[in-house]
Image: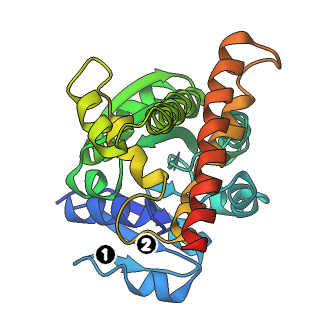
């Protein structure tokens, strides 16, 4: 059992399993979400629930936050009240995928309240979070990251990439590579169909050759080809991926050759997912 007190704000698709994992590992967790039905489902033994983010942060050694957008994170931190409530010596950990620049700005604002910020880009799904097998891209001062290491170790494997902002930059590069690969995989399967191959037979053959990849494994779901998929599920995933595509585009100057190539591949996937959602609607 750890004596470290943790407030975790944002119990969504990734926030919930992260908060559950921390509670399972013995941290004293107070979970927070502004939506009562979501908050009610946070029921890990020994954990507490709190609907008010400021109260969830009050006096905590570590506050983790997992909201969806820059705007949501900025709204939570706009007047510094949450940092003041956490207090001197606290560590504020951003696990949301937001702009690296916002993490740097918040680190400066938090410092005036004696709170340190680290940004943790999270890679892996719900089951990886619950099993403590996430890949964590971390940005922050060496001593702050060292202090937060038990919290990080509970969730997965850490790659400390530099000062605040570098964790999110690493996460965006990771996602950019993934989404571009998804786009290429979707394209090769569509091309195969045009050449009179059976899509699934070709995919399985490619997975046995040098073209094998995680992207080829999962891209049929993005193309709406798995049982039980709906237009809404495809569109929701598409919108989530698009957010990371747009954020990653800001990492390089317009016209950068490498970024242009990657963004083009990502756009192919987004367009293909639009088509998949439409095809599901028409069935």
For mark 1, give the secondary structure. Answer: loop
Residue that appears at 54% across and 35% down: 183
Considering only vertical position in the picture, is 252 above or below 171? above
Residue 103 image position (x, y, % from top left)? 66, 39
For mark 2, give the secondary structure. Answer: strand
Model colouring: rainbow
Considering only vertical position in the picture, is 114 above or below 8? above
Residue 273 image position (x, y, % from top left)? 59, 52
Residue that appears at 37% across and 83% down: 41
Q: CA separation, marks 2 and 1?
A: 7 Å
Quarter of the view holding residue 73? bottom right
Return the residue found at the far right: 254
Q: Which mark is residue 271?
A: none
Quarter of the view holding residue 203? top left
Return the residue found at the far top: 257
Instruction: Specify whether residue 273 is in view.
Output: yes
Residue hosting label 1: 47
Disc 2: CA contacts within 10 A as few (<14), some (14-19) or many (>=20) = many
Counting residues from the N terminus, which is met first, the one under dot 2 or under dot 1? 2
Residue hosting label 2: 31
Task: Tally the numbered discs.
Answer: 2
Considering only vertical position in the picture, is 178 above or below 58? above
Instruction: Specify whether residue 114 is in view.
Output: no
Q: Nearer the viewer, residue 212 or 86?
A: 212
């Amino acid at each position: 059992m750890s004596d470290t007190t943790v407030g975790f704000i944002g119990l969504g698709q990734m926030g919930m399993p992260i908060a559950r994992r921390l509670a399972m590992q013995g941290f004293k967790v107070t979970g927070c979400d502004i939506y009562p039905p979501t908050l009610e489902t946070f029921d890990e033994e020994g954990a507490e629930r709190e609907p008010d983010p400021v109260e969830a942060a009050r006096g905590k050694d570590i506050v983790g936050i997992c909201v969806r957008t820059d705007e949501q994170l900025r709204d939570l931190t706009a007047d510094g009240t949450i940092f003041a409530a956490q207090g001197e010596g606290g560590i504020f950990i951003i696990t949301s995928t937001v702009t690296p620049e916002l993490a740097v700005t918040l680190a400066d604002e938090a410092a005036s309240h004696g709170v340190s910020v680290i940004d943790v880009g999270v890679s892996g799904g719900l089951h990886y979070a619950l099993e403590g097998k996430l890949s964590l891209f971390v940005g922050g001062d060496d001593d702050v990251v060292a202090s937060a290491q038990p919290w990080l170790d509970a969730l997965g494997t850490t790659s400390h990439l530099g000062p605040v902002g570098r964790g999110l930059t690493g996460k965006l590069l990771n996602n950019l590579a993934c989404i571009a690969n998804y786009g290429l995989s979707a394209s090769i399967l569509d091309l195969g169909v045009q050449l009179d191959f059976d899509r699934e037979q070709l995919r399985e053959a490619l997975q046995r050759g040098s073209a094998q990849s995680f992207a080829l494994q999962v891209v049929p779901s993005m193309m709406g080809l798995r049982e039980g998929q709906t237009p809404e599920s495809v569109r929701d995933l598409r919108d989530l991926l698009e957010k990371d595509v747009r954020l990653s585009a800001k990492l390089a100057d317009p016209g950068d050759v490498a970024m242009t190539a990657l963004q083009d591949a990502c756009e192919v996937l987004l367009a293909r997912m639009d088509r998949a959602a439409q095809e599901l609607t028409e069935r």
